[in-house]
Amino acid sequence: MISLTDRAVEQVKVLREKENIAEGKQLRLGVKGGGCSGLSYILEFDEPKDLDKVYQIKGIDVLVDPRHELYIAGMVVDYQSGLNDRGFIFENPNATSSCGCGTSFSTS
């Protein structure tokens, strides 16, 4: 369904420790309306909600609202620390267009 590269997993662990994220919070991956292309990605630490699906990806519990699965199925989340690309990178096969910053997309 969703993949995290080794670099993304390592950065999630770094952020969890650096920000002192409570153990009860897990990584949430999803979408929300907005951004210059129509939808923006959600990548945050959050507490599980009743309808969430929980995926175990390389030792990381990832929360996904089932209503978001259509938009992120098959997505790969990477982390880059180079001069041109820095931060989490979303490679989404469902996106038909995206903005220049790579954090928002459209499926139509």
Image: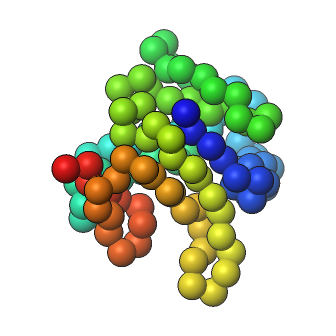
Is any part of residue 85 visible from this angle? yes
**Image point (59%, 52%), residue name:** 77
Q: Position of residue 72 (x, y in %)?
A: 44, 41
Judged left or right of residue 25, residue 59 is right
Image quarter hosting the N terminus: top right
Give the color scheme: rainbow, by chain, secondary structure or one colour.
rainbow
Task: Give the side of residue 64 with respect to residue 14, left or right.
Answer: left
Farthest-out residue, top: 50
Q: Residue at x 57, y 50 (%)?
A: 76
Image quadrant of residue 44? top right
Where residue 19 appears, x then y in whole percent?
Answer: 71, 52
Residue drawn at x 45%, y 52% is 92
Q: Position of residue 57 (x, y in %)?
A: 71, 35
> How many numbered markers are drawn?
0
- Residue 25 in view in this figure: no
Q: Residue at x 68, y 75 (%)?
A: 81
